[in-house]
Amino acid sequence: MGSKGKYVFPSYIKMASLTLNSGIISFKKDDDYETTETIWKLIVPYLQPYDTIYEPFYCSGKSGNIITSFGFNVIHKDEDFFLHYNDYQYDIIVSNPPFSIKKKVFDTLKEIDKPFIMIVPVSTITKQFFRDKYKNEDITILIPPKRLQFSKKDVDLNRCWFDCLFVCYKLGLDKQIIFL
């Protein structure tokens, strides 16, 4: 325990923090980790059939620039996805959504019913909300060759303590699990 009731996590765990105030533990979510060019390169072959990509979770805007640099037409604006997803014409949604709202994201994606590729923690596919919505759907899981490492405030990090994968919906791929 650190000073003033704040638990200090080991240096390799920096994605969340706990604070103890009068016997109540509060949890601070930290969702502003960005996807690096190395990560996006892994899925470029799966984006080739699509003309326009919607990357709805902005953070600093780097993600959209990276995907655009691969030659794709990308819609990537600093606005609320849940209010604006119907404002654009696009073929596929691709993102690393804030993990703290992934249930809401996957609920909304199901309503939109367009192809998507989402980067999420492995545990996402075991959650009841995901199973309820997607168990009978055209889902493919892309498993990266190693643990994905993200960036924060333009600094590439090498400390992600959990595994992530790509959940793909309606891509029409032959396999349900693909090892990248």
Image (cartoon, grey):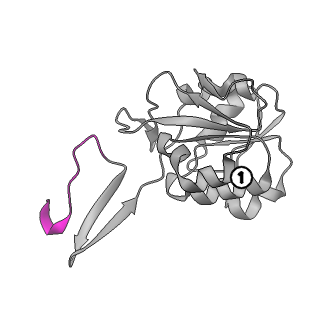
In the image, is residue 11 above or below residue 38? below
In the image, is residue 126 above or below residue 172? below
Q: Main secondary structure of the magenta part?
A: loop
Q: Nearer the viewer, residue 152 or 122?
A: 122
Q: Position of residue 25 (x, y in %)?
A: 28, 69
Corner quadrant of residue 166: top right
Q: Position of residue 91 (x, y in %)?
A: 83, 40
Location of the C terminus by quadrant is top right
Corner quadrant of residue 51: top right
Over which residues does the magenta segment extend? 1-13
Q: Position of residue 50 (x, y in %)?
A: 82, 32
Location of the N terminus by quadrant is bottom left
- Residue underneath mark 1: 109
Image side of residue 100 versus residue 41, left or right: left
Viewer can see residue 70: no
Corner quadrant of residue 155: top left
Q: Nearer the viewer, residue 48 or 157?
A: 48
The residue that appears at 39% across and 39% down in the rendered structure is 162
The residue that appears at 55% across and 29% down in the rendered structure is 39
Q: Position of residue 19 (x, y in %)?
A: 26, 66
